[in-house]
Structure formats: C-alpha cells, structure tokens
Amino acid sequence: MRIEDIQRIVMICHGKDCKKAGARKLRDCARERLRDHGLRKNTLIARTHCNGLCKQAPVVCLQPANVWLSQTSPRQLQRAIDDHLAR
C-alpha cells in the first residue's frame, strides 16, 4: 500500500490492557470485514501504542469518520465498519 492510496484508517490500541482485552482479535476482525467490503487495499489498519484509555480497553478509532469505540467487541467493530467506513 502506498501512503497516497490510504483513504481510511482503523487504529487499534495495542497497549498492555487492550492486548489483554482482545486487540489482536479485533485486528483480524477488521481485516476480514474490510476485505468483505472491498476496502482492504485502501484502508490502513494501524496498531497504536497506549492511548491512555486503559479502563475502556480495547479502544478503536475509525478515521476519517472520527468514531471512537471503547470496550470493543468484534461484533461492535464489524457494525462500526459497516456504518462508518463502508458507505
């Protein structure tokens, strides 16, 4: 992927608490859902360092929609991708 091709970003915190709460599973879920919508080639999935919102783990941010998710389940992430990135 070239930087100029990026149209969307899914940022998933991979701090200690978010990893324990399932961040890796969310990354796989995002990859699959974006692929289902044909968006994988122009969407960056970025693993972030701790965002300081550890009590709300795992934390995800969808850009350019500026949607923040906390205590995110795979199902919530799928719905958010459907609603905010796959329009």
Image (cartoon, rainbow, N blue to C red):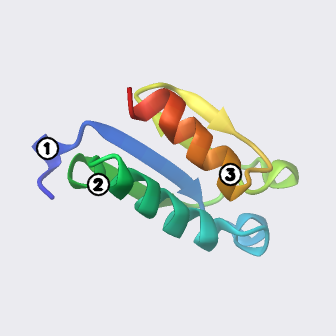
> Could you classify mark 1 by the number of other residues whose Cα lies within 10 Å: few (under 14), some (14-19), or many (20 or more)?
few
Q: Residue furthest right?
A: 55
Disc number for residue 75:
3
Q: Are marks 1 and 2 in contact (CB under 8 Å)?
A: no
Q: Label 2 sits on what residue type?
A: Arg
Please say if 66 is above or below 46: above
Q: What residue is disc 1 on?
A: 5
In the picture, measured across the screen, residue 5 lies left or right of residue 83, that is: left
| Distance CA(mark 2)–CA(mark 3) | 18 Å
Which disc, if any, is residue 85? none
Pick the quarter of the image with the N terminus. Answer: bottom left
Residue 17: x %, y % from top left: 79, 67
Per the image, the residue denoted by label 2 is: 40
Residue type, numbered disc 1: Asp
Badge 1 marks a residue whose secondary structure is helix
The mark lying in front, picked from 1 and 3, is 3
How far apart marks 1 and 2 lie (CA) works out to 11 Å
Which of marks 3 and 2 precedes in the sequence? 2
